[in-house]
Amino acid sequence: MTRHIRYAAFFCVLLLAALLVNAARVQVVQSPAYDDNPANRRATIARYGQPRGNILVGGRPVTGSRDSGEQLRYERTYVDGPLYAPVTGFASQEYGRTLLEATEDGVLSGSDPLLAPLPLLSDLTRARAAGGDVVTTLDREAQRAAYEGLAGRKGAVAAVDPSTGRVLALVSSPSYDPGELSGNGAGAARAWARLNADPDKPMLNRAVRQTYPPGSTFKVVTAAAALDAGVIRNLDARTRSPAPYRLPGTTTRLDNEGDGCRDAPLREAFQWSCNTVFAKLGVDVGVARMGATAEAFGFNDAGLRIPFAVAPSTFDTTVDKAQLALSSIGQYNTRATPLQMAMVAAAVAEGGQLRPPYLVERTTRRSGSTVAAAGPRPARQVVQPSTARKLRQLMEDVVREGTGRKAAVPGATVGGKTGTAQHGVGNSGLPYAWFVSWAQADRDMEPKVAVAVVVEDASADRGDITGGGVAAPIARAVMEAVLDP
Amino acid sequence: MMSAGVDTAVAERAPARPARLPRRRGIELALIVLAVLLSVYGYCAVGLARNGTLPPGAAGYGAGLGVLALVAHLAVRLRAPYADPLLLPIGVLLNGLGLVLIYRLDLETPGDRAAPTQLVWSTLGIALFILVVAALRDHRVLQRYAYVSVVAALVLLCLPILFPAVNGARIWVRISGFSLQPGEFAKVLLAVFFAAYLAANRNALAYAGRRVWFVQLPTGRVLGPIVAVWLVSVGVLVLERDLGTSLLFFGLFVVLLYVATGRTGWIAVGLLLAGFGAVAVGRFEPHVHGRVEDWLHPFASIDAGQGPGQLAQSLFAFAAGGVLGTGLGNGHSVLIGFAVKSDFILATAGEELGLAGLSAIFLLYTLLVERGYRAGLSLREPFGRLLAIGLASLVALQVFVIAGGVTGLIPLTGMAMPFLAQGGSSVVTNWTIVALLIRVSHSARRQYDGEPAP
C-alpha cells in the first residue's frame, strides 16, 4: 500500500506541477500577446487612469482633464475647443485621437519612455509617468483673429513664421468642440453621429487636410518658375501674350476678368492677375521646370508632417500644353492646402528659403523639464534669392495698388496675392476666395508672418468675389495680430 | 510564554507517558501569527493602493482573524497535540488571503459586498473545525458511519435537482436568501465512505480477473461498485450539469481504489470509463460542449465581434500579472465579471500577485496535500490511511480542476478554489477537511510517542 500511496502522491505533485508550468506559460510566455490583444481593456484603462498632459498655446493650456469616476477615468476637456480643434484634434475614450492628440499621444498619455526619470526602474515597477505637456508654436492672438475673421464661414487660415517655420495660426471653419467627443456617455455617441452627418463637415481640418484649386495665388509659383528659368528677366518688359489666349492644341479661348492684359509686363500681369499672361508663361517655362519649382515649394510631397500629416498639394506633371496652361493659373489638377500656400508666401518672404512648418515647439514633463525640443529645421533654397526679391516686389505691388489693397497694414511692408478659383462642373460652384500674403513690420529686420486664407463659397456678390474682398481682410487681421507685440 | 504554559498544562494532565516526540505546537503558533500578519498586510496593501490610507477595518479584521486562528490553535493544542503543525497555518493563510482578495474585489462592486459574509462563513468553518478536533476523539469512529455517509452524500447531491438552475448548473440550494452548495459537503462524506468501503473490501477487490494484453482486469463481481460510482458521477453531470464535481468524485474514487488495491487495471478501467463519459457528454451535452469549445478557442468570441468571454478575460488577467504582478488593488480582474470572486478568484491572485504569488499559492496547496499524504503514510491502519489520502487528493484534484480551468489548461468547470473563493459551503467543507487531517495526523504521530522514532 505504501508504494501505491507514493505513486498517488507523485500523481498529485504532477498535477500541481502542470499548474505551475501552465501558469508560467500564461503569465510569462503568452503574456505580451495577451496584453496586446485589442479586446483586452487594460491598456485602455491604464491610459485613462491618470490626467492627460496638456497642450499649451502661448504658455497657457487649452486642454484639461476631468475625473469622471468611470472605469475609463479621466476625460479630456478643452478651453476654446472650436478655436483650437484644428490643432488639438480630439481625444475620446470611444473614438480614439486625432491631430496633436494623436501624434503627441505618447507624451500626453505618459507612455513615452522619455518621460520616466529612471526608465529601467519604471519598467520594473510598471509605474506610468505623469502625462507630459506639449508646447505649441501657435500665436493666441493670430489664431483668434483668424477664427473671428472667418466668422463661421467655410474656409481655413494657415499662418507661419517664414524665418523659422513655426505655425502661428491654423484655423478651420466651421469648427466643432472636441470636448463633446470625450467621455463614455451617450452624449459622445450623439455628438459623433451629428458631427459626421453634418454636411458642412466641421471635423474636417480644412487648413491641412483639404486641398483647393489655388487659382491665381498659384501665379506666385508660376512667376517664380519663369524668373528662375530666365524666361522673364525684366519685370517691366512687355510679354508677348495675346488676350484672349487660345490654349495650345485646342480651340478653347482663355480670357481675363479685366482689360489691358494683352502683352502686359509681368509686374502688371501679376498686379491685375492676368490669366492669359500666366497661362502662356507656364507653357513657355515648360512642364519640367514648372513641376520642379512647384515641388521645391512643397507640392506633390506626401511626407510633410507638422507633426500630423498634411494632405499633399498637387501639381500634375503628366499634362499636355493646354492642361499645363490651366495648371499654371492654379486650375486643372493643381490643388493646394492653405498651409501649402502659406509656405509659398513664406518662402518668397524669406529670400527664397523654405523652412518646413512645425507646430510643436517642445514637449515637457509634468515638472516642466524639457523632453524634446523641435527647433527650426534646415531651410531649403526654393528659388534664387534674386528671384525671391523680384517676387516680393510683385507681391508688394498687389497690396499697394493692385487687387490686394485691403490687406495693407500700417507701419509694415505687406506683399500678397489674391485668387479666385472656380470649381464644380462647368465652374457652377461658388468660387473659392484666396489670399496669400506676408508682412514685415518697418522696425523688423525680416518678415514675421506669412498667411494663406481661403474662404469657400465666397458670397454671391460677383463684384466682390476676388480674394481681395473676402479673404484679404482676414489675412490683414492675422498679420496685425502677429506684428503687434 | 503562553505556549510554554499550555505545554506544561498538557504535560501535567498526562504525566504518565514521557513525551519523547516534540509536539511542535510552538512552531504552529509562530506560523499562525505569520499567516495572520501576512493577511493583515495584504488587507492594508489593498487599502493603501486604492485610497492611499490604511483601510478602516484593518485592526478589526486582523483581530478577528487572529482570534479565530488562536482559538483553533488552542483546540489543536488541547485535543490534538501531536498534529502536524503546518496544516492549520496553511488553512489560516489561505483563508486570510481569500478574504483579502474578496475584500479587494468588493471595492470594485460597491453594491455587492461579499467579504463580511465570507468572514461569517469562515468563522462558522473554524467553529466546525474546532468541533471536529475537539469532539472526534478517534477518526476510526467514522468507519462505523460509512453507509450513513453515502446515503447522506447522495441525498445532498440530489437535493439541488429540486431547485432551479443557476447560470446553467443545478448545484445550488436556495433557502430564504441563503444559498448552499450541498455537493461541497458531499465530498467529505463520500471520502469517508470510500475510505471505509475500500478499507473493508480491499482484499476482495484485489482479486485479479482476466488478463487482456498486459492489463490485469478486475473480476466482474467487484466491478459493480466502480460502475455504480461511475453512473452516479455521470448522473450528477447530466442532471446538474456540474462537470467539476463529477470529475472530482470519479478521480477521488479511482485514486483511492488504486491505493487500496494496488491494481493498475483499475486505473485503466477508470480512465477508459472517464474518457468515454467525458467524450460522450462533451459531444452531446450543450452546456459542457460549450465549455470544451471555450477551452479550445478562448478568443473565438473576440473574433466573432462579441468581445472577450470569461475565460479570455481570465487569461488576460493572468497575463497582465506577469512575473511580479500589479500589486494588490492595482489589477483589473473585475473585467471577468460574473463569478470573479468565486470560480475566478485565482485570476485576481494571478494578476495582482503575479506568477510569484501564484506559485506561492500553488506551493501552499502542494504542502497541504503533502502533509495529508504524509499523515496517511505514517498511519498503520487502512481506514485512516485511505481517509487521509482521500482528503488530500480531494484538495489536489479540486485545485487542479479549477486552477487548470481558469488558466486554460483544461476545460473550465465551475468549482470553488479551496479556502480562497467566495462560497460558504466550500470554506466550511475545507475547514472540515483540515480538521480531519489534523485528527489523522495526530493519531499518526501519537502512535510513535513513547517508542523510538521511526
Image (cartoon, rainbow, N blue to C red):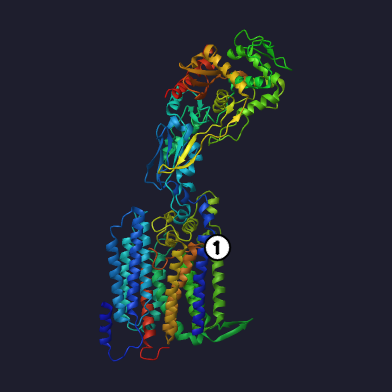
Q: Is residue A40 above or below residue A300?
A: below
Work out whether residue B325 or residue A136 is closer to the camera in this orientation and state it. A136
Question: Residue A352, located in which quarter of the rendered image?
Answer: top right
Q: Residue furthest right?
A: A249
Residue type of the residue flagged with mark 1: Phe
Closer-to-camera residue (B301/A168): A168
Q: Residue at x 56, y 60 (%)?
A: B296
Asked if B340 appears above or below B222 in the picture, the reply is: above
Foreground residue, B35 or A393? A393
Q: Nearer the viewer, residue B189 or A430?
A: A430
Residue shown at 70% from the left, 26% from the top: A288
Residue B176, visible in the rendered structure = no
In which quadrant of the rendered view does residue A340 lie?
Answer: top right
Q: Residue shown at 42%/78% (left/top)?
A: B372
User: Circle 1 marks a residue in which chain?
Assistant: B
Residue B245, image x, y percentages: 46, 69
Packing grade of label 1 (10 A; few <14, some 14-19, many >=20) is few
Residue beneath disc 1: B284
The image shows residue A10 at horizontal and vertical percentages of 51, 77
Residue B427, given in percent of the width and then of the height, sits at 37, 68
Specify whether A144 is left or right of B114. Answer: right
How many numbered marks, from 0 up? 1
Does the image show residue B365?
yes
| Secondary structure category for the residue under label 1 | helix
User: Residue A458 at x, y = what percent?
Assistant: 52, 18
Where residue B74 sits, quadrant-wise, is bottom left
Left/right placement of residue B158 relative to residue A395 reads left
